[in-house]
Image: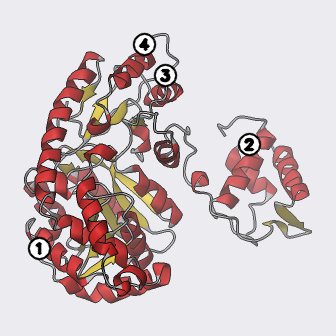
Amino acid sequence: MTRTGTLIEQVMAKIRARIASRTDLPGARLPSVRAQAQALKLSVSTIVEAYERLAAEGVITSRPGAGFYVAGSVAPLALTEIGPRLDREVDPLWVSRQSLESHRSVLKPGCGWLPTSWLYEDGIRRALRAQARAESLELTDYATPLGHPGLRQLLTRRMAVTGIDASPEQIVLTESGTHAIDLICRFLLKPGDKVLVDDPCYFNFHALLKAHQVHAIGVPYTPNGPDLQKFESALREHAPRLYITNSGIHNPTGATLSSLVAHRLLKLVDPSELVIVEDDIFADFENSPAPRLAAFDGLTRVIHIGSFSKSVSASVRCGYIAAKPEWIEGLSDLKIATTFGGGRLAAEIVLRTLTDSGYRKHMESVRLRLSEQMDRTAARLEKLDITPWLVPNAGMFLWCRLPKGIDAAGVARACLKDGVVVAPGNAFSLSLSAGDFMRFNVAQSADERVFKVLGRALSPSAPAKSQPRPAPAGKAG
């Protein structure tokens, strides 16, 4: 028992947390007083008092001669109660809220998107004007279950560039990339299943998997892909149902999957029933296509997903799933059940923007700006003794180690007071082994104030120091 409060309060908090996370459902019998005392290494009298107080609050009920049972109806799902309690500065939902809710004056080097001025606003405005002149059907009606045929046809051509062979009938459009993963989880998982994720990985994967009440298992990520030895061990020990990863530009590390690791990974999973979900949201930021698991696998056990919120617009929500034909009908049925027809208007705007004559040149300029800003940001961070794990070939992220003895959660607290939102490493690490790491978005790090605030937060007088934590396995240096 490590939480604050009296021993009785700690027992009560533990039971409330199990109920809030739906580990103990209404009607479930609690361990006997003696069994609970033995499990928690506390006195019987402490457990009796905790149970009696919870019963007085109506949280549990006592049945004479039968024990104590969870009362009431199913508790609303509380994601923060699932898994270990985290400091709010490293809780994935807290980081997302700070990035989404903060005033425009707040600097956001910890967010995961481009500044507004970097996006293809002219192309979106042209698409909106053209769409305003479209037939009423395009402006007002539901989309078909699979989604806009023209956009799905374009996606087949875009995926072919990375070697993925998918027909338009193998693609279903979604409301976003997150919605795509949500549909896949609904389609393939049941509560209690095991899912592998990279450690570190995109922090919203953690939150989404909690919502599906499955067990996430982290596999250390290296500069060339997942640690195959650890991956094989996890595969053998846990028999996971899914593995969710980025094959192109990895979030948060910026690393790229190598062909050798891709081939060995697919060979490892071949005898199993594991399904791989390959998130390709950063495809347009690559200078040259990295290996894709879906290309090597032929969409047999790999599901390929993506969206356009990073490259086109986060306001125009549209994503997609590419999968083997026999799964598409079930996924489209789930799409109808969760969003009914989906967005016809968003898909049309995305299609017009992607096929606009200026989009290709716009993305070339974005990639060049990112490359230049990557160098500038790395140089500025080096002056603060903040060291990149690796310097990525493309993309917007730098995964960096802080100076020895500095805890990223403390830095996050100090920076937020000065109007800067940063992304501490343990928000991305399931094993909480990245306490001295941070992810920096180089496109959001152009303002000199970011580094001045960081410098103050890292100074000896700032309340940011704590015991150093081990770096994630597979670090580059």
In front here: 236 or 349? 349
Q: Nearer the viewer, mark 2 or mark 4?
A: 4
Q: Residues within 10 Å of mark 4 (few under 14, many from 20)?
A: some
- The numbered mark, 4 or 1, whose residue comes first in the sequence reads 1
User: Based on the displayed image, in which of its 4 quarters is residue 474 positioned?
Assistant: top left
Q: Amino acid at mark 3?
A: Ser
Q: Amino acid at mark 1?
A: Arg
- The numbered mark, 4 or 3, whose residue comes first in the sequence reads 4
Residue drawn at (16%, 75%) of the image: 154
Question: The C terminus lies in which quarter of the figure?
Answer: top left
Check whether the beta carbons of the residues at disc 4 and disc 1 lie within 8 A of each other. no
Residue ID for mark 4:
459
Q: Amino acid at mark 4?
A: Ser
Q: Amino acid at mark 2?
A: Gln
Rendered view: 44 above or below 353: above
- The numbered mark, 1 or 2, whose residue comes first in the sequence reads 2
- The numbered mark, 2 or 4, whose residue comes first in the sequence reads 2
* Residue 157's disc number: 1
Q: Residues within 10 Å of mark 1 (few under 14, many from 20)?
A: some
Residue 445: percent from left, percent from top: 31, 32
Residue ID for mark 3:
466
Identify the secondary structure beneath mark 3. Answer: loop
Q: CA distance from mark 4 to mark 3?
A: 13 Å
Identify the secondary structure beneath mark 4. Answer: loop
Q: CA distance from mark 4 to mark 1?
A: 51 Å
Farthest-out residue, top? 461
Identify the secondary structure beneath mark 1. Answer: helix
Residue ID for mark 2:
10
The answer to whether one can see residue 432 in this image is no
